[in-house]
Amino acid sequence: MQQGIRRLSPASLAWRLVVGLTAIVCVILGTAVGDDRWWPFAPMSQYAFLVQNNGVINSPYMEARTTEGVLVRVPLSGTGLGLERSEMEGQLPAFIREPKLMQAIAILHARRAPHEPRYVEIFLRNRQTSLDGERTQKILDMATWVVGNPQDPENWEGR
Amino acid sequence: MTSAIRTFFAPPIALARIAWLRAIIYLYVVFDVLVVVRDPIAHGMVPVELYRPVILREALGFPAPTPVYVQVLRIVILASALVAASGRLPRLAGAICAVGMFDWLTNAFSYSKVDHDHYALMIALIVLPTVGRARFRDTDIRSEAAGWVVRLIAISATAIYFLSAWAKMRFGTWGWANGSTLIWALTRRPNGIAPWIASHPTLTHTLQWLILTAEFLSPLLLWARGKALFFGLAFFLGFHLTTYYLLRIHFLPLVVCLTAFMPMERIPAWWARRRRVGSAHPPAAPAGPSSAR
């Protein structure tokens, strides 16, 4: 048994149509011409890139030499360093163009793990796997940063 | 024409659907901030040099995250989401939750990584407070305001699929479906039979064509009814289950928004009918005297 229909007044319907159409136009424009900074109207670009069949798979990662002289993998994750690998990859061009930006990695490590040996040098590297039959791998150096004031990187004067 | 637009954007839908959607979406928000999108807490410690705020966050004046700020924000979101899920103060609690989640998600996405599966959820949180009180028993009251909310969530969910296909053409070109993007994903995040699939290029190309076709056709869900809608939704739910099994990628924020398509308000009546039918047919009596068995 239907009790009735609650209709919208013309004004109520009008603003809803405007809001709805605006959201639709913005999200279409975001994918057509926008970039990630347009979120929530950013392009729906997850997995929207072409990997050639005879191309390569790039897996960038970071390593660091500590004050104890040990080479360690920088734990790029939310629970590790507090920054995901995909977030590092999103800023890859900036890290390569301006390696000084990796000072922030040393600062973050010092904040998140104050009792661990500090980073002295940070390496941005890429493990490249070819998609040929052999699936051969090679490691490429992309950028290196010698940490300023490694014991207290936050208070490095060049920052 | 006006009538067609009205029917498409604001069809009269039972108010009870809003009560169901509120319960599902606001409870999912609790899960989202505690389990799925936890980066904002960690971002509180990230140096500001790595902060790349999304345009709207910057324009609206939200600050760069700090450790205390993100902890307080999480409490505000959890409290408002729980109140809104209960159906109390739907406009106030819903609006606070929407602003809080905008802050939370733009924080998460302001470090050069965006998850596009949260678009429909964000739209849902913005539009849900536009409907006043809605109860689970309001199955007989149909409302155009409720219909507009349901339609906008449904449109936003299908937009994610359709625009994913568009983005593949924009960034991956028309060669995407015959390329090795799926092999790339299966190689980087392998799980279960993923390595076996990755070693069969013909199979991965077939799967890529299937994904692309389904994404391009997804807007048909907005007009589908009955079995067609059921099979369409079942296909996409199966797709998300498969990607979770193979890649551990779940798209849950999008999946909860797909519930907008489902007439959940009919569940209590359907359940009551089942129980009545069950009680009307007691277990069959023995066909003959026990001595004859």
Image: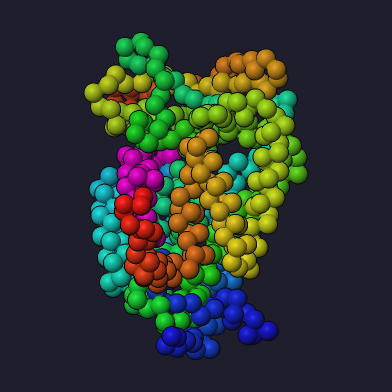
The image shows residue B149, relative to residue A121, as above or below, that is below
Q: Is residue B127 shown to the viewer in this render?
A: no
At 35% from the left and 76% from the top, the residue drawn is B137
At which x and y percent is residue B224?
A: 62, 66
Return the x and y of residue A114 as percentages of the image width and height.
25, 27
Please tell me which residue is depicted at 48% across the width and 77% down the height of the picture. Answer: B13
Residue B34 lies within the magenta run: yes
Residue visible at 36% across and 31% down in the picture: A81
Q: Quadrant of residue B285?
A: bottom left
Would residue B13 be seen by someone viewing this image from the given angle? yes
Nearer to me, A4 or A85: A4
For the N terminus of chain A, the quadrant is bottom left
Which colouring convention does the figure follow?
rainbow
Please tell me whether residue B117 is drawn above or below residue B175 in the rendered image: below
Span of residues in magenta: B22-50
Q: Is residue A42 left or right of residue B75?
A: right
Q: Residue furthest front?
A: B292
Q: Quadrant of residue B204?
A: top right
Quarter of the C terminus of chain A within the rendering: top left
Circle count: 0
Q: Is residue A6 above or below residue B116?
A: below
Please name whichever residue, B150 or A118, is drawn nearer the observer in this view of the structure.
Answer: B150
Q: Position of residue B106 (x, y in %)?
A: 43, 52
Q: Is residue A51 magenta?
A: no
B17 or B47, which is in the foreground? B17
Q: Residue at x 53, y 26 (%)?
A: A60
Prevailing secondary structure class for the magenta stretch in the rendered image: helix
Give how far across and how far down residue A44 sits, in percent: 59, 50
